[in-house]
Amino acid sequence: NCKVRVQNPENPNNSNQSSPVFTIKGNITLTNPSTGFETWDAGGTYPINWSYVGPIQNVTIQYSANGSEGTNWVNLTDSTNASTGTWDWNITAGTQLSTKASIKVFDRDMPISESISANFTTRGTVKVTAPNASGTVLKVDDPYNITWTKYGSIQYVNIYYSNNSTNGPWKTVALNVIGSNQTHPWVVPDDIGNNLRVNVSDASNPNVYNLSSYDFKIIGGINVNAPVDGD
């Protein structure tokens, strides 16, 4: 509660003060995210950064999947020390994802001092977990489980493989597989080579995908047909 008083230096009784009271607040500026061009992936950790002037001790950080118009703000942290100027956000699998996400940072003790980001994108991700080891060798016609981990609200995935490492072309294994299954049985094709990769992508957004980290091999198999029991 602040006021301003103006006083005659030659007559202290000749003075006046402002009415009503007013507030002096700190000023806080969100510096990351800030451009609106950011794309942050579920499962990742990203720094939320700010600067400030004035007597701000602690800040509250909130997230909205409905944009900066100010609806459905969810606390990411109730309170963190303002002087650090940064707080790491791990985007969990349960986070509501959006193409118009927004972050708000405000003075915990004086919420009217706030800063809100431009709308940016939070999106799901998928990580191939098998085949994903160096030195993997598969045999033609053998059964093999392609596995992945998904983060965020990815409903269906498409699965492909390439015999030309990361360069493609990509050949279809299966389309519109339920993402939460996180595994798909595959009969290893007759596509012998040393530089194969698997690609798992979000069926609704081909820009969200992941490749196996290492080339693997497909080799031929030999079946002995004779002699058989009794020969």
Image (tube, helix red, strand yellow):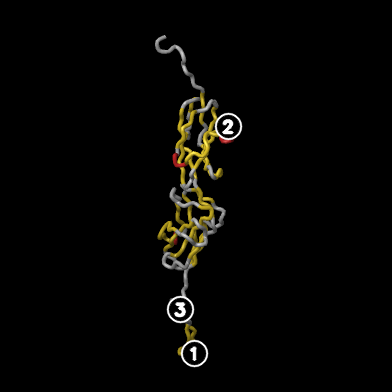
Q: Which SS class for mark 1?
A: loop
Q: Which SS class for mark 2?
A: loop
Question: Which residue is drawn at the image coordinates 59% and 34% (left, top)?
Answer: 169
- Provide the residue designation for mark 1: 10
Q: Nearer the viewer, mark 3 or mark 1?
A: 3
Q: Position of residue 56 (x, y in %)?
A: 44, 66
Q: Which of the two residues, 163 or 203, is positioned nearer the viewer here?
A: 203
Q: CA distance from mark 1 to mark 2?
A: 91 Å
Quadrant in the picture for the N terminus: bottom left
Q: Is residue 159 above or below residue 34?
A: above
The dot on residue 189 is none
Question: Which residue is drawn at the image coordinates 51% and 22% (left, top)?
Answer: 220
Q: Position of residue 231 (x, y in %)?
A: 42, 9
For marks 1 and 2 on the same chain, the one whose residue lies earlier in the sequence? 1
For marks 3 and 1 on the same chain, the one whose residue lies earlier in the sequence? 1
- Are discs 3 and 1 less than 8 Å apart at CB? no
